[in-house]
Each structure stands twice: as C-alpha cells, then as structure tokens.
Image (tube, helix red, strand yellow):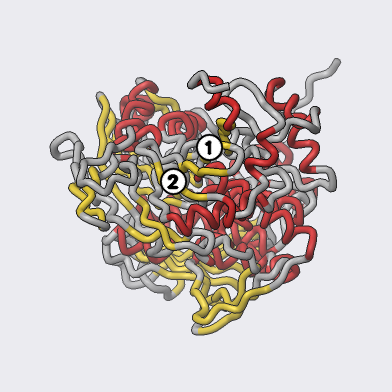
C-alpha cells in the first residue's frame, strides 16, 4: 500500500466539509465573527435558501485593508495567539478556519472597513485563491458574500434540502442568537422578502415573546449549582420539548444539556431557552468540528442547575380554600431567596370538552358544603397524572387495545359475561349497572379524593373523571378520523409567531388537507381555520405547533396517522383532572358520554375508569344474603 500526499485542493475541501455542513453552518460562522467584532446590527440575506447566495452584513470593528488576505488564510485568527489561550476561550471563534473553508467550496467576496478609516477593502476568492484585492468605498463594518456554496463539491451539494428547508434552519439559528443577544438587532431576508427582525433593545422577554408568541405566558427563573449559573426561560407547549442552550454566549447542541432537561423536568413540556454562565477555564469548547458540543469540567452541576430551575418553574400548587360555592387561592412561593422571577398561576377556567370547569390542582371536599382547606398535590404531579401512550387508529383498534392490558384486565374482554371491573373480581351484575342511562342513575357527589360516585339499579359505581374524560375525548378524535376531517373557520384569525411561520408555510398544502387554513396579511402568516375536533378545545397556535412537530418527527410515516395520534394526545391532556369539581349535571353528562364509547371501562392508557360495587356485594358484606 502506497501512502500519497493529498493535493491542497483535495484536503482543503475535506476540511471544509467538516466545518460547513449546509448554508446554516456558514451563516453561524459569519454571525459569530460579527458578534466577536462587537456588531450591534447584523443583517442576513439569502437567495434560494442560501444555496445560490448568502450575505451577512454587520457594523462591527471591520478588517484593515492589509489584513484582508489573512482572513482567508487557514488558521489565521485575531481571537487567540498561543496555546495558553486554549485553556480559557472567551470568544465564539478561535480556529481561523471558517472563512478559509468557505473560500475552498464557494465564491467569496469580503468588503470591510474599520470605523476609523476613510475607505475600505474588497477581496474576492474561489477555491482558496485570491482573485481581487482592491481599495473600495463601503460602510463601516464587514460584508461577506458567499455564492454557489459547494459548487465544486457536488457530493455535499446534492444532500442540501429544499430552499424552504434550508431557510428554516437559518431562521432557527438567527432566532436563537436573537434571544441570546437581545442587545444586537438581527434581520433576516429571503429572496428580497423580510422574514423577521429584532430591534436590539436589550429586552430578552420582548424578543422571546415576539419570536415564540406571548401566549401561553413565558416564565423565567435563575438557578445555580457549584460553578454554574443558569438563566432559564420556559413556555408551556403541547408535544415535546424544544431546547435551545447557550454556554457563555455560545450556541451548543449538547446531549448533556438536553438529557438534563428530559430527566429533571419531565413534566414541564415546552420551549426552553437555557443560558449557562461558567468560568471558561471549566469548559472545553474544542471537541467538535462545528463547535456544537462542549465538555464541562463538572457535568453534574449542569443537571443540578436545570433541576433547580425546573423545581422553581413547577413551584408549589396554590392552596385552595372553599368559600361557599367559590374557591379562593392562597398562593405560596417556596423559592429559595434571590432565585429569580416566578409568577404563581391564578385560578382559571379550563377549556374542556363542552363544559367550563375550574382548574384547581387540589383535592375537593365531599358534598357536605362545609368550608375546609383543600389538599394540594406535590409538585411532582402538578403537570399530569399519566404518561401519554402511542395511540392506535387501526380498524381493530378497540380490540387491539385490550390485548395490551394487564393479564387480569384482558380477562375482562375475553369473557363476554364480564363487563365492569371491580377491585379484584368481575360479575354479571356489572353490565346492568353501567349500561343504564342517566335517568336511571343518580350522582351522589364527589369524594374528597375527587372520584365521582353514582347510585345505579345494580349498585354503587365509582368513576375516575380524568380517565373517563380521556376515553371520551380519545374516541371522539378517533371517530373524526374515520368520518373525514372538517375545517372550522376562526372568528378572529390568529397571527403566528416567527418561530412557526416558515415551517407552516412550507407545509401549507399538507395542512390544508387536514382542515387548517393559513392566510398572509400585514407581512405575516395567520391561522384562518383549524380542524374541527368536536368538543376538544385546544388554542389554534398550540394545535398547529403540535401538528407541525408531529409531522417533523414522524419521518416517512403516514401524515394522517401522525396528526390523529397527536390530536388524541392533546385531547387526553385537556381532560379534566381528578381534582376538578363537577356538578351533578356535569357528572351525569360524563357518565352518558363514557357509556357511549366503544370501550368505556379503560382510559387509552389502560387504566380503569370504573369501580363497581354491586348490590350482591353489599348484601354479602352486611350479612343480609
């Protein structure tokens, strides 16, 4: 075997492929250079998603005319000078590879002028060779133009996504940096059209609410652990976690941080923005070609900081006190002192399935009507009682659900004579007990634990209202899936935040097939109609966000199945809680709706909805047989 020395044209392109993966990689490197240069305004322009042209302009320190050729020289940088500087890197860039890599795989033009100089310089290069170096008139700052990215590297170019897909990646990157650096104004344009812009006011909340949307409310807390300080922003959302993280102002996509969020804040699903501050000497940022991952000297402190932040966000459920027929709250804030900003949630009306319920997150007293303090659950159970399953929408879904139940519960479905689960046994009287319509059933009230109790001709029946409502909502969604989707126009169209606009626009035709309608107005995108989901009430933006996440994560799976599963999950999350107070009419409506289901005896997760104590059991217990 003969060892060959690769020509510069080959190894330079190989090296460039490690640094630059797609247009968003080039934009990231140029933005970091601009921020290191002290820019307060950064404008990014794309043509064809960046595949044809990328332009990044800033008002930073600029590059002197004589040093312009060095900007395209590999391993030439102004960020570090010696090996000792690698022990504590304070800048975003430091390798001196980015611009050289761009010049190796694209046509590059740089115009730059330091503010103190009267004229600037122009530099053009391709395939690593400088073709022009001229004096020119230009504005203070730097303008970098990259044309025909990967034009001489077809193996990489053929893997680029569509223009819309590449634009979405660049927009996501700019949104993250706009949130991290609210003191810098960011502007994104595509094919001459403005996508979004921030004003550089320095108000991070203002930027987050503009990019994410102001509803639901965005919460922020501060936490610390050992050598790490954390500023955490969180917005509840349907679907899955969307985590952006920065360490000392550097955007990272580190599995340690995402794992910490998944483990320490399992019940706080939503959008996360995490800003870690740590001594640069305690992190190694030189372990990934694209600088996307870093290594912490004390990784356990990352988990501890995220856990403390999640506990503050979860807080302690308000203590509810019954006052006649109303409920008042006595909020308790159990944060450590000086731990950040926290707003206790107020009592609100839950948008349920056709009923208006008061959400209390507490246990209720029985039907005595006496004033009493009501128990508050632990923060561990504040955001949900059950895990979300993988739902089945096949033609034999009801039968297949039963096969996934525990052995004792499967026996219930295998034996046609057994119809209602009890604590340990099933008997034939149960069928008559639960098949009665409300006119033959009386709601006796709600226990302090939240469970409903009904008097039926066959005996007493206890119902878990949360599990029952989950089953009702789930089967309504499944029925809609079989009948075909209808669209429900909105009385007032809802504007989409920039974080959703590009992805929604990209999938507009597909979404239209499932009941969504989008319209452009005032330079933005608005939701004009949503799928008609019967009585399942989810805010339009949350419904669209969850639907896009399902389509994005589902890969090549059938879009119809992905969306119906996602909507059924939302329906379960909207179900009333065990601690929700129901009136007699509401309880009887829930009873009727439950027993109109194909499978009323278990929620979609396999938990029982009903516990029946038959008249025969009462007789045996009291010795009256």
Q: Residue at x 30, y 59 (%)?
A: 205
Question: Quick check: marks 2 and 1 in contact, CB under 8 Å?
Answer: yes
Q: Residue at x 30, y 32 (%)?
A: 308
Image spot of residue 102 (x, y percent) = 60, 51
Image spot of residue 75 (x, y percent) = 50, 38
Closest to the observer: 518 or 113? Answer: 518
User: Quick check: 297 above or below 88?
Assistant: above
Image spot of residue 573 (x, y percent) = 52, 48
Residue 447 can be seen in this image: yes
Which element is circle 2 on? Answer: strand
297 left or right of 111 in image: left
Q: Quadrant of residue 7?
A: top right
Numbered circle sitting on residue 444 = 2
Residue 78 can be seen in this image: no
User: Quick check: 618 above or below 163?
Assistant: above
588 left or right of 349 in image: right
Q: Residue furthest top?
A: 1
Image spot of residue 127 (x, y percent) = 68, 51
Closest to the observer: 409 or 30? Answer: 409
Measure the alpha-carbon separation of dots 2 and 1: 9 Å
Numbered circle sitting on residue 460 = 1
């Amino acid at each position: 075997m003969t060892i060959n020395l690769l020509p510069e044209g080959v190894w330079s392109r190989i090296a460039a492929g490690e640094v630059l993966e797609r247009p968003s990689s080039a934009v990231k490197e140029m933005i970091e250079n601009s921020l290191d240069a002290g820019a307060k305004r950064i404008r990014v322009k794309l043509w064809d998603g960046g595949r044809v042209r990328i332009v990044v302009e800033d008002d930073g320190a600029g590059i002197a005319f004589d040093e312009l050729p060095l900007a395209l020289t590999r391993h030439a940088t102004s960020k570090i000078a010696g090996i000792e500087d690698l022990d504590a890197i304070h800048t975003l860039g430091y390798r001196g590879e980015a611009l050289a890599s761009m010049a190796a795989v694209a046509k590059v033009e740089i115009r730059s002028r330091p503010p103190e100089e009267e004229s600037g310089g122009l530099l053009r290069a391709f395939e690593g060779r400088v073709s022009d170096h001229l004096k020119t008139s230009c504005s203070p700052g730097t303008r970098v133009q990259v044309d025909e990215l990967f034009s001489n590297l077809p193996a990489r170019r053929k893997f680029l996504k569509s223009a819309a897909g590449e634009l979405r990646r660049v927009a996501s990157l700019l949104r993250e940096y706009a949130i991290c650096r609210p003191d810098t104004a960011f502007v994104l344009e595509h094919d001459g059209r403005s996508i979004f812009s921030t004003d550089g006011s320095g108000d991070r909340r203002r930027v987050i609410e503009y990019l994410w949307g102001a509803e639901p409310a965005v919460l922020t807390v501060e936490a610390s652990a050992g050598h790490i300080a954390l500023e955490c922003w969180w917005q509840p959302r349907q679907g899955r976690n969307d985590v952006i993280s920065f360490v000392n102002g550097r955007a990272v996509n580190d599995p340690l941080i995402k794992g910490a969020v998944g483990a320490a804040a399992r019940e706080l699903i939503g959008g996360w923005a995490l800003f870690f501050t740590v001594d640069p000497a305690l992190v190694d940022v030189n372990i990934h070609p694209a600088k996307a991952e870093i290594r912490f000297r004390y990784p356990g402190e990352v988990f501890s900081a995220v856990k403390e932040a999640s506990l503050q966000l979860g807080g302690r459920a308000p203590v509810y006190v019954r006052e006649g027929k109303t409920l008042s709250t006595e909020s308790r804030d159990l944060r450590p002192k000086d731990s950040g900003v926290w707003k206790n949630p107020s009592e609100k009306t839950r948008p349920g399935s056709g009923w208006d319920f008061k959400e209390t997150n507490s246990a209720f007293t029985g039907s005595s009507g006496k004033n009493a303090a009501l128990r508050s659950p632990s923060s561990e159970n504040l955001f949900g009682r059950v895990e979300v399953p993988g739902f089945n929408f096949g033609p034999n879904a009801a039968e297949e659900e039963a096969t996934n139940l525990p052995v004792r519960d499967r026996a219930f479905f295998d034996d046609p004579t057994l119809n209602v689960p009890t604590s340990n046994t099933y008997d034939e009287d149960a069928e008559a007990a639960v098949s009665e319509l409300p006119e033959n059933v009386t709601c006796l009230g709600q226990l302090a634990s939240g469970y409903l109790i009904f008097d039926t001709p066959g005996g007493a029946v206890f119902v878990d209202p949360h599990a029952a409502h989950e089953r009702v909502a789930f089967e309504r969604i499944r029925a809609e899936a079989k009948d075909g989707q209808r669209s429900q126009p909105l009385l007032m169209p809802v504007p989409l935040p920039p974080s959703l606009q590009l992805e929604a626009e990209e999938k507009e035709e597909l979404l239209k097939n499932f009941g969504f309608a989008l319209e452009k107005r005032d330079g933005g995108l608005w939701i004009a109609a949503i799928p008609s989901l019967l009585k399942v009430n989810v805010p339009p933006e949350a419904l669209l966000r969850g639907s896009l996440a399902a389509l994005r994560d589902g890969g090549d799976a059938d879009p119809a199945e992905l969306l119906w599963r996602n909507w059924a999950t939302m329906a379960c999350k909207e179900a009333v809680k065990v601690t929700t107070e129901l009136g007699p009419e509401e309880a009887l409506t829930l009873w009727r709706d439950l027993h109109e289901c194909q499978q009323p005896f278990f929620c979609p997760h396999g938990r029982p909805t009903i516990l029946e104590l038959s008249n025969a059991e009462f007789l045996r217990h009291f010795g009256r047989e």
